[in-house]
Amino acid sequence: MESKREDEMIYFTSDLHLGHKNSIRLCNRPFASLEEMDETLIANWNRVVTNGDTVYVIGDLMFRMQANPADILKRLKGKKHLILGNHDKSWLNKVDAGCFFKSVERYAEISDGKHKLALCHYPMMTWGGIGRGGYLVHGHIHNNRDAAYWPLLASMDQALNACVEINQYQPVSFEQLVQNNLVFKNT
């Protein structure tokens, strides 16, 4: 299990969908074009994250990316870990993942020094540590509250959505993630 060093921050983000024009319409994102979306997401990332920070990408970093994925990854600050999402196969085989990510996994359990966290792209009913106050950090659902599962997921205080749509289109700390999810689940 990894733990937080005193001199670094740990951030979480999910479902950036860089390169995916339809995500603007499908998720009601506030961008006029794909180029504006991609450049804003990259700028927001680099405004928040330093090269000494750790970022857990909880899946779907890119989708249908026309540009070379390595060119995008080189621009993103921080020590990156990728939790695989359903769209990551579309670009991941085009790069040497070891050059850009400290780890690439389907599921991980970490500690930020204060909390035990399970990381998975998909929301789950249970996870390692749930009975001992552990949290799940997930993605996949974007800002969707219309699905049949929403009432159940909304009632799960320990399940935290890392999707960019509810996190100001930027990586966020655990504390910000908790606060943003309270707002998302209660509005």
Image (cartoon, helix red, strand yellow):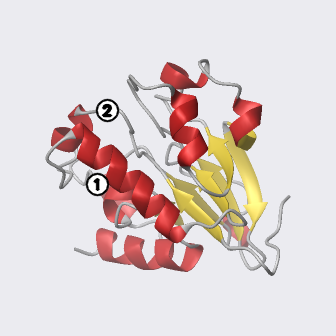
Image location of residue 97, percent across then percent down: 70, 31
Q: Quadrant of residue 165?
A: bottom left
Q: Residue 152 or 99: which is nearer the viewer? A: 99
**Residue 160 drawn above or below residue 186:** above
Residue pictured at 31% horizontal, 54% vertical: 150
Mark 2 residue element: loop
Residue occupied by mark 1: 143
Kindly identify the amino acid type of the residue bearing the numbered disc 2: His
Residue ID at (39%, 74%): 180
Which element type, helix, strand or loop, lies under badge 1? loop
Q: Is residue 16 left or right of residue 75?
A: left
- Label 2: how many residues lie within 10 Å, few (<14), some (14-19) or many (20+)? some
Q: Is residue 112 above or below residue 162?
A: below
Q: Mark 1 to mark 2: distance in Å?
A: 16 Å
Residue 94 image position (x, y, % from top left): 59, 19
Residue identifier under label 2 = 20
Q: Is residue 148 visible?
A: no
- Of residue 71 and residue 180, the one placed in the foreground of this image is 71
Instruction: Count numbered badges in the picture.
Output: 2
